[in-house]
């Protein structure tokens, strides 16, 4: 169950990153600087909360899955990489 939780939250994190990179940011770049900044500030604050929570849950689940099955090192690597997104 831990592995599934880690995988699902990592997929949600990836989907959100792709959406921001290919849809939200290019649309925001078409605004003038003042309007883009006014839109970006609240969006960034909300996005940071979502990103940090998904990275934390996914990272901890990955490390916990590795701890449960210690011979499966990719879970540890994935958990560490997800936790690195928080810093």
Image (cartoon, rainbow, N blue to C red):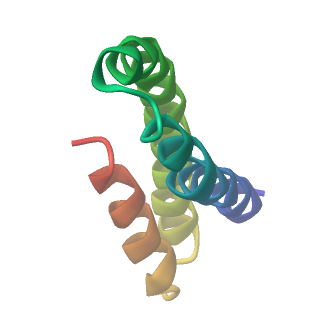
Q: Percent position (x, y) of residue 58?
A: 55, 51
Residue drawn at x 45%, y 30% as measured from the top left: 31
Rendered-image quadrant of the N terminus: bottom right
Is 61 on the left-hand or right-hand side of 45?
right
Is 83 on the left-hand or right-hand side of 58?
left
Where 73 sits versus 39, above or below? Answer: below
Residue drawn at x 48%, y 48% as measured from the top left: 60
Is 5 on the left-hand or right-hand side of 23?
right
Where 70 sits versus 23, above or below? Answer: below
Q: Viewer-proximal residue, 2 or 26?
A: 26
Q: Percent position (x, y) of residue 71?
A: 49, 88
Rendered-image quadrant of the C terminus: top left
Q: Viewer-proximal residue, 22 or 46?
A: 22
Rendering quarter of residue 11:
bottom right
Q: Viewer-proximal residue, 65 or 17?
A: 17
Residue drawn at x 50%, y 70% as measured from the top left: 66
Q: Percent position (x, y) of residue 39?
A: 46, 17
């Amino acid at each position: 169950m831990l592995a599934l939780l880690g995988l699902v939250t990592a997929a949600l994190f990836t989907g959100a990153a792709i959406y921001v990179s290919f849809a939200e940011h290019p649309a925001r770049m078409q605004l003038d600087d003042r309007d883009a900044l006014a839109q970006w500030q609240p969006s960034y604050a909300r996005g940071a909360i979502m990103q940090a929570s998904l990275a934390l849950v996914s990272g901890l689940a990955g490390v916990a899955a590795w701890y449960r099955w210690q011979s499966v090192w990719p879970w540890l690597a994935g958990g560490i990489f997800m936790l690195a997104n928080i810093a």
